[in-house]
Image (cartoon, rainbow, N blue to C red):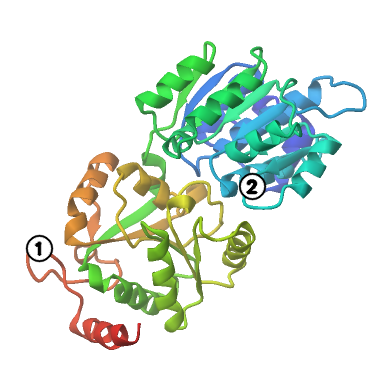
Amino acid sequence: MRFEDFGLIEPILKAIREEGYTDPTPIQVQAVPHVLAGRDLLGCAQTGTGKTAAFAWPILQRLTAAPRPHGTHPIRALVVAPTRELAAQIHESFRTYGRHVHLRHTVIYGGVRQHGQTQALKKGVDVLVATPGRLLDLMGQRYVDLRHVQVLVLDEADRMLDMGFIDDIRRIVAAVPKQRQTLLFSATMPSSIQHLADSILTDPVEVRIAPGRPAAETVEQFVYHVDLADKTVLLKHLLDAHPEMTRALVFTRTKRGADRVVRHLRYSDVPSDALHSDKSQKEREQTLEDFKAGRIRVLVASDIASRGLDVDDISHVVNFDIPEEPEVYVHRIGRTGRAGDQGRAWSFCSLAERASFEAIEKLIGRKVTLVSDHPHAPPTVKPADTTAHKLPRRILGSRRRLSARW
């Protein structure tokens, strides 16, 4: 199928061509016709599959064609996302694909002063992208009026439920008209999401894009069995040994862990920075900009960045800590190997994390290659016994020398 086959208007097709896209992704093929037709939709797809465009194009087209009160711009489409980063990236997609249509859009989220956001709302917007907390706050202050909403999108609904937003979501749903189109997207489909979908969707079309498999098919995956204390030195060793590791995204379980890894890397003169929720919004935006521009080589992030992080050409993802939930692994490695490109993911697995990694392998349906078993993998960590792989003696020596300073 071609983009022209969707029946999209020329201004939107022009914007798509300007972005260099040539073929629609599977979720776009399955979802766009139904969203254009006004159907409710339940979509199961992870980030990196073209999901945002699958709802942005039809929304832009439907709002462009629909009449609105003369001279006004009431909120006619509302997109709710769990994090500031994802909300900002969705808004950027509407700006990109809507550059040739005459619609207004803005994004609101917490962590920054509300003045600029309220000023944009006062001028009127057709499409509002928001995080739940700031949205409800501005609704309470009467800056946001949802009585004219025609399309409601809940993106990464499972993530919103994990973050405790279920009551906020129900309050938002209650504030929009009952006669509306509702689109709900989730990377996973636990019973809680199915119950939410059943309560807010009307005769929905269901679109499922093989959970966990698209990213896995375009990402070479390797695992190191390594002692917990050796992880930081192993990371530095790999960075030294692989100059093609130009833009690496490293995931830790905790914010404190992310800061600690950055301190170690900076001590070794590796340009790096941390991204997590303890940073101010301004700091987070600057860090992301530096990473995108290539001013920092390594971005160390807690799982706040595992979904919705839209950075081109991430060469490597490193699971410095193995996530407890297998689905999180899929979202993490999905930051590389996007748009059909080949990516590479390395996981540092300590003895205590073995069970968690076995659950990951069960989810993705295959064994991840041990580094020592792969002819083209990074420098190997040879197994010394059946309990844990040990670092080469020269690396261990470096760790002992450096740990005294770190």
Is 297 positioned to the left or the right of 237 in the image? right
Q: Image height check: is 302 above or below 298?
A: above
**Secondary element at image label 1:** loop
Q: Look at the image and tell me in which quarter the C terminus lies.
A: bottom left
Where, by quadrant of the figure, is residue 354 drawn? bottom left
* Element assignment for label 2: helix
Identify the residue under disc 2.
88
Corner quadrant of residue 377: bottom left
Q: Residue 121 carries which label?
A: none
- The kind of residue on which mark 2 rests is Ala
Please identify the residue farthest to the left as the structure is shown.
Answer: 385
In the image, residue 212 above or below residue 232: above
Which amino acid, by three-letter code, is at mark 1? Thr
Which numbered disc covers residue 387?
1
Q: Could you tell me residue 50's position as x and y percent?
A: 55, 39
* Structural distance between the alpha carbons of marks 2 and 1: 44 Å
Q: Position of residue 209 (x, y in %)?
A: 43, 32
Question: Which comes before the other along the chain, label 2 or label 1?
Answer: 2
Closer to the camera in the image, 190 or 6:
190
The answer to whether 254 appears left or right of 123 in the picture is left
Q: Where is residue 79 in the image (x, y as percent from the top left)?
A: 63, 33
Instruction: Work out whether residue 279 can be spotted.
Output: yes
Q: In the displayed image of the protein, which residue is found farthest to the right?
A: 71
Q: Position of residue 127 (x, y in %)?
A: 73, 33
Q: Which residue is drawn at 28% across and 70% down?
A: 231
